[in-house]
Image: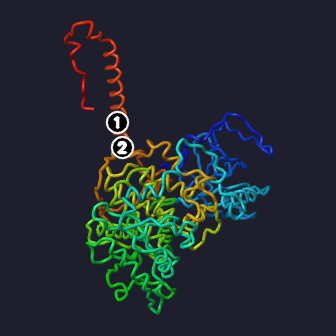
Amino acid sequence: MASAPTSKYNSHSLENESIKRTSRDGVNWDLSEAVPRLPGETRITDKEVIYICPFNGPIKGRVYITNYRLYLRSLETDSALILDVPLGVISRIEKMGGATSRGENSYGLDITCKDMRNLRFALKQEGHSRRDMFEILTRYAFPLAHSLPIFAFLNEEKFNVDGWTVYNPVEEYRRQGLPNHHWRITFINKCYELCDTYPALLVVPYRASDDDLRRVATFRSRNRIPVLSWIHPENKTVIVRCSQPLVGMSGKRNKDDEKYLDVIRETNRQISKLTIYDARPNVNAVANKATGGGYESDDAYHNAELFFLDIHNIHVMRESLKKVKDIVYPNVEESHWLSSLESTHWLEHIKLVLTGAIQVADRVSSGKSSVLVHCSDGWDRTAQLTSLAMLMLDSFYRSIEGFEILVQKEWISFGHKFASRIGHGDKNHADADRSPIFLQFIDCVWQMSKQFPTAFEFNERFLITILDHLYSCRFGTFLYNCESAREKQKVTERTVSLWSLINSNKDKFKNPFYTKEINRVLYPVASMRHLELWVNYYIRWNPRIKQQQPNPVEQRYVELLALRDEYIQRLEELQLASSAKLPDPSTSPAGPSQMMPHVRTHF
C-alpha cells in the first residue's frame, strides 16, 4: 500500500476471467485484462483518459467504472500504473476547464477522496466524453442522491466466517462478570423508545428502576443516560458513558439525575466520589449552556468531582485533518516539514485524546473512583475516551476479535454517527457534520501499538484495512448512524460484515511479535516527543516516500516462525516413521536403539 502503482485490494473474492464480453453499448469488456470484480459488482462503462499523476506526470490509460470502483490501467508500455479506488472513497467530483480551454490536459475531472489523495483525469473535449463520465461517477459515487442502493446491499461475497456473530452484547457483559449484585441488564430500550441512538440492551445500576431511567433521560441530551461500558474485574470500579446534562442558562437541576449519579457511585462502597470527565474545553461546556446543555456543577452533584479534558469539537478536527492533507499530498515539503506538521495541530489533538483516556484508565485501575465520561451528545469524544481507556485496561480488546468487539460495542452500537461523519453515498461534501473522529481513534490505537509492539495481536495492516472499509461501502459494518437505523434497514441480513473478510484470513492481520498478557495495563506516553505522524497511512500514496512494507524485521521474524513450524513438522514425521519401523517389543528383546527416547528440541 505504499505507493500508487499497486492495487489497493487483493481479496480472494476478486475474480479474473479470461473471456470477452460485449456490453450493452457494444464495448468489449475484456476481463483478461485482470480488472478485479466482486460478486455483485457490475460494469458501467470504460473510457480512455489521461491520468494526471502528481508524481510522474500525465499517463495515458483506460479507466473502468463499475457500481463499486474506479479502476485505471496504464496503456503506456513503460508504466505499470494501476489505480483501484472504491467509489465510496470519493468525496467530491468537479469539472476541470471548459469547452474553450486551450492548455494541454486542461479539460477533464478533478476527484477529491476521503483517504488523503486526489485524482485528476484529462479527457478529449469533443463528443461530451467528460459529461458522460461525470454523470456516471456522480450517480454511482453518491447513490443516495440518485435513489440507488449503497454497494454493500449489492455485494454477494461469501466468506467462511460470519462477522455479524462476533459481537453479542450479553456474552460480552457476561465476560465482564455482569450482571451482578450491583449492576443489571435492562431491556427498557429494546424498541429504542427510551433513546433512539442507544443499543437495545443496556447495563444500569441494580437499584435504579426503569421508571428512574425514564426520568433521568429527560435531563440528558438526546436521552443518552449514564450506562455502564466496563467494570474492573477486581476493584469493581466502572466506566460509565452518557451525554451532557440539560442545565441551560438558568442552571436547572434534576433530583432524579443527581440521585442516579449517586447510585452509580454507591455501586462501589469503597469510593467517596464519582469522577466526571467532560471531554470538552471548559469554555465550550459553558457556551453549551446557551443551547440548553451544560455540565454537572459542584453545588448540585456533591459527591462528584468534575474535570475538563480540553478536547476540541468535530469542526476543529475536520479542519486539522484538511491541513494534514495539504502538507502530505501530493508533495511533502522537506525543508519546512516539522513546522508544517506542527501548524496542523493534528498530533496535539491526538495527544489530548490519549491524555484523557490515560486519566480515565488510571482512575479506574487504581480503584480511586468510578468514572463517568461525556462530551456534548456522547457519541464522538466520549466513544474515543471510553474505547481507548478500555483498550489500556483490558488485554482482551487487544486481540483481533476483542478489538472488533470494542469497535462494535463502543462505536457502532452506542451510536457514533458514521453516516453523518463519513457521508456514505452522500454528495454533500461540505456537510458540517463530516469529521474524522473514528480515524483519530484508530490513529491513537496505532500510536499505542508503536509504543507497545508486543501487546497487540493485530498489525498495522489490520488498522489500515478498517479505515479503508470505513469509506469503501463494500461492507455494512459502518453504515448508518445508530443501531435502530441498522435494524430498520436489516443491515445484518442484507450486507456482509467487514469482520467476515478479516476473520476468514486472520494470518494476514496478525502481529508476529504479539505476546498474550493478562491484566497488564498499558499507559502510553502522550507527550509530543513520543507521538509521530502515521506515515504508512497518511503518506502512503506518495511513491517517493521510502516505506518498508512489510517491516523487514517483522518479515524476517515471520519467516523464522514458518521455518520453525516446518522443522517441527519434519521432526514429527521422522518420529512417526521411526516408530513404524520398530519391531513389536513383545516379540523381540529390547535393544539400545529401541529404548532411545524421542528426540526433543528447544522448539
Residue at label 2?
Answer: 512
Q: Which mark is residue 561?
A: 1
Above or below: residue 575 compared with residue 309: above
Q: Which mark is residue 515?
A: none
Q: Residue at x 51, y 62 (%)?
A: 412
* Residue in front for this viewpoint, 219 or 550: 219
Residue 595, quarter of picture: top left
Are circles 2 and 1 on residues that touch, CB within 8 Å?
Answer: yes
On the question of residue 527 being in view, the answer is: no
Query: On the picture, is 527 further left or further right than 45?
Result: left
Label located before the other in sequence (2 or 1): 2
* Residue in front for this viewpoint, 526 or 240: 240
All told, the count of numbered labels is 2
Tell me the amino acid under the disc marked 2: Pro
- For label 1, the crowd category at 10 Å Cα-Cα, with few meaning under 14, some 14 to 19 and many 20 or more, is few
Above or below: residue 571 compared with residue 18: above
CA gap between label 2 and label 1 equals 8 Å
